[in-house]
Image (cartoon, rainbow, N blue to C red):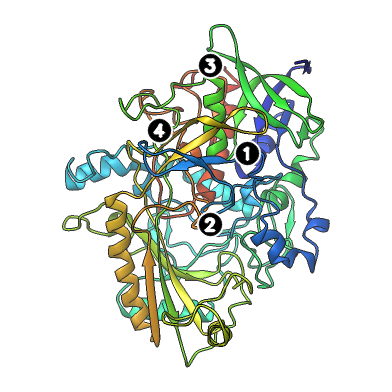
Amino acid sequence: MSITRLKPVDVVVVGVGVAGSIVCKELAQTGLRVVGLERGRMIDPAHDFAMPYVHDELKYDRHSDIIQNLSRETVTFRNSMHEGALPVREVGSFKPGECVGGAGVHWGGSAFRFLPWDFEVRSRTHERYGRKKLPQDCTSQDWGLTYDELEPYYDQFEQIYGIGGKAGNLNGEIQVGGNPYEGPRSREFPNPPTIPTYPGSIFGKAAAELGYKPFPKPTASMTRPYVNPYKLMLGACVHGGFCANHGCAMGAKATPLSTVVPALLKHQNFELRTHANVLKVNLDSDRKRAVSVTYMDARGRTVEQPADLIILTGFTFNNTRLLLLSGIGQPYDPLRNEGVVGRNYSYQPWGKVQLFFEDKVFKRFMAGGGMGTVIDDFNAEQLNHADLGFIGGAQIGVQSSGALPIRSRPVPRGTPRWGSAWKQAVAHYYDRSIHIGLNITCQSYRGSYLDLDPTYRDAHNQPLLRMTFNWHENERRTADYLTKQAVEIGKAMGASRMGSSSSNGDYSVTSYQSTHNVGGAVMGMNPATSVVNKYLQSWDVSNVFVVGGSAFPQNSASGPTETIGALACWTADMIRERYLKQPGALV
């Protein structure tokens, strides 16, 4: 096999999504020669997301146009290590992206910071409830990075993405109208919150009457025209729906394509290479330093790109798999509970309460990404777990993100599953139903992990990533308890009929739940239990950094996107201010 070897560059960034685009931009500004490698295609929003074609639900939501092509590469799945794993052949539980911008192009726009508790789950739980509160096989751990350390970088990301919301804790002072449980903010959101929707108002009123503290959901859909620090203009959201799984025709949803990439491409010292599928990070003879990456280009040629610094910024699965294929870090062995790469894979449990009304019409089609009203009263430390048989919590709320006409067909239990009666119920309840959703925390466990599949291979004859995961009793109890609390809010909202469900039983990979996959290359304070240090730098190979949801040691109730973006800002700053001045281990 012939290999085309290119001239060395300063930095190679693998994956140009939420994290990768920011890292490329921040490092290109220093004058370094930066190459961004993206396995997917380039998107031209003015063409690809033009009206009315962008509102093609079959293309984007059903046929997954900007989602990973599973015919070339997928993951295999099993619930436990004692089972055989099979390849995931159809997009189901989660939707990794495959284009410039990654999953950040099709995300829904909910933009939460993690709470201070999320970064110190193990130590805070032990301190408050004792060491026996966490399950025996739980491997959750502190991040090695605190909320206070990351706060300036949360702020930086929110300015880049123009997040709209209302501060609840401004420099330690609780603010009316925001989330009183959030960590202290150094300043207000760059944009105001969305105007409450009708479903959000009903939920907020009922929650407040029950003694809870509702607040507007922070959103990455612009609440007014906005110019970000990179001098890019975003338009105001017109509430036309088609947000999650779609691009935005108005340029109002903050994505890498609208907030970073156009400014990044203006740097003469930056080069974007699309359809570049990275196969391996190559190490020197001592295996202590990375010297290059090998990738397959659009013409099927094998290319080697040497670089002084290599930064992996892909999706959780891709970062972990590339480390395993490259031999960076010891693979995790669940039987001996040793090794680190693949350890602490975690997902996000869910709960749902469907409400049906006869006296209210909601016009659910008119909505925007991230619009909604939520409460954090049952999340993190504000929920007293002393007498509960679990540790964890949830965000509970009503979101108005647009009811897609093909996918959204809620009907009450007892409705026939086909025929004229079913059609009448679908038509009647399309605008007379809403749901309360729960995003629930998930701890990490010894038996939930990622490794290379011994049987199945991708289009390049490399082993697929194998995912071993199931809900544990702690998460089933959390989901059951918190869904019951949401049912009580639903009753207070005056619904005529209700139905509830949650992530009990065994985890299934077939139906969509969230793209909140985390772990596998986690950060921490101990090389024996983490792949990267607090700066996202590999413990074993100091010129390799790994940035993304793969670094999360367990999962929060909040969506991961804003924290991934903040970590990208944090790591880029640490590389610029510390690593470049004195290359080597930062810890």
Determine whether the residue tagged by mark 2 lies in a helix, strand or loop.
Answer: loop
The amino acid beneath tag 4 is Arg
The answer to which image quadrant residue 448 occupies is top left
Q: Could you say which disc has been placed on residue 584 in the image?
A: 3
Q: Identify residue for label 1.
A: 73
The amino acid beneath tag 3 is Gly
Along the line of sight, which residue is nearer the eye, 101 or 309?
101
Which of the two discs, 4 and 1, labels the residue nearer the N terminus?
1
Verify CB contact (< 8 Å) between mark 3 and mark 4. no
Determine crowd level at label 2: few under 14, some 14-19, many 20+ residues with C-alpha closer than 10 A. Answer: many
Residue at 52% x, 62% y is 218
Determine whether the residue tagged by mark 1 lies in a helix, strand or loop.
Answer: loop
Q: Identify residue for label 4.
A: 343
Nearer the camera: disc 3 or disc 1: 1
Residue at 60% x, 41% y is 19
Residue at 76% x, 43% y is 41
Q: Could you say which disc has been placed on residue 111 in the image?
A: 2
Location of the C terminus by quadrant is top left
Determine whether the residue tagged by mark 3 lies in a helix, strand or loop.
Answer: loop
Q: Position of residue 144 (x, y in %)?
A: 38, 34
Q: Position of residue 94 (x, y in %)?
A: 54, 51
Which of the two discs, 3 and 4, labels the residue nearer the N terminus?
4
Residue at 58% x, 58% y is 163
